[in-house]
Amino acid sequence: MSWWETDDDEDEPEFDESDVRIRPNRRGSRPRTKVRPEHADAVEGVVLGVDRGRYTVLVDEGGPDEREIVAARASELRRKSVVTGDRVDLVGDTTGDEGTLGRIVRILERSTLLRRSADDTDEVERIIVANADQMLIVIAAANPEPRVRLVDRYLVAAYDAGIAPLVCVTKTDLADPAPFLANFDGLDLPVFLSRSGDMPLDAISERLVGHRTVFVGHSGVGKSTLVNALVPEANRATGHVNVVTGRGRHTSSSTVSLRLEHDGRTGWVIDTPGVRSFGLGHVDPANILGAFADLARIAEDCPRGCTHLPDSPDCAIIEAVDAGELGESGRVRLDSLQRLLATFA
């Protein structure tokens, strides 16, 4: 027997996990866990509007128990944006009774997402609306003057999001919209013409029922006036155009979804605040060409890797325009495309 071995080993006590002393938690609470409840009893709804951290959510849309619920966002969603148009799951008090508050615990999969950035270099995107399938671009024939570049940007954002664009030109009694609309001859765009006291409400409503349509437009073009005419109970604030600057005043300050009724059918009008710029910092440049369907067809003959910019060799679009195949409007469309592409070059 070696000197370190003794016959006393069998007399030493045995220890197990139960003998380990654990210092009690001073706060008297259980350790935090990342396991979240499944909320199997949650009800589904759609967000109609957002106001200072409170969400108005419509539950059982079109059903016998349709109701609006005021809800807060659950703590596990604090890093996620909940926006107008989102389909969400709610728990808590979902009766919709006055003074009650539900809780949004899940954001369901989004079919579309319309975004913009402050400018083309800003990587921070601002979500405008979720799950819209149409965009109505509202522009004025005059006062304020229509801007081709801004409409181009709306179109790019719409096509990038997979949303079908429509156009409504207001104040056509002040100027002929034809020269401006000629810039978009190559695009398959449904266009509505509106004048003071003569809005094509039936024609517009017919295109909106069965859809969730987001309205966008420069401040002062009459977007909120059109919304109020389509949805009389909307009561959206309207403003005027500054006679000195030619700019409209921001009136709508929030994005809100409003029910549109037409011939026994329903659609949703999503009104947004007026903007003077529409940054595309979030857009994949490869998707920009999709907003110019007439040029995109010709681009199929371009060499691989063609940028379609003025210095692009053998660009089929440039060659077609130079040959006069697309007329003057084609040159304007190409200029718009190149200006947008140059932003990301």
Image (cartoon, grey):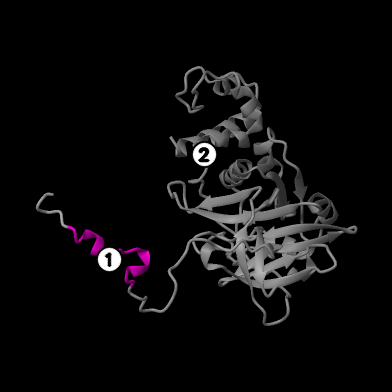
Kindly identify which residue carries mark 2.
284
Kindly identify which residue carries mark 1.
13
Q: Is residue 78 left or right of residue 51?
A: left
Q: Nearer the viewer, residue 176 or 21?
A: 21
Q: Is residue 111 left or right of residue 286?
A: right
Rendered-image quadrant of the C terminus:
top left
Q: Residues within 10 Å of mark 1 (few under 14, many from 20)?
A: few
Looking at the rendered image, the disc whose residue lies closer to the viewer, 2 or 1, is 1
Above or below — where is 167 with respect to 223?
above
Q: Judging from the image, what secondary structure is the residue with disc 1 in? A: loop
* Whole-percent x, y for residue 82 in the image: 58, 61
Q: Nearer the viewer, residue 297 or 42?
A: 42
Q: Quadrant of residue 81?
A: bottom right
Q: Judging from the image, what secondary structure is the residue with disc 2 in? A: loop
Magenta span covers which residues?
Answer: 7-22
Q: CA distance from mark 2 to mark 1?
A: 70 Å
Q: Which comes before the other along the chain, label 2 or label 1?
A: 1
Q: Quadrant of residue 321?
A: top right
Secondary structure mostly seen in the magenta stretch: loop
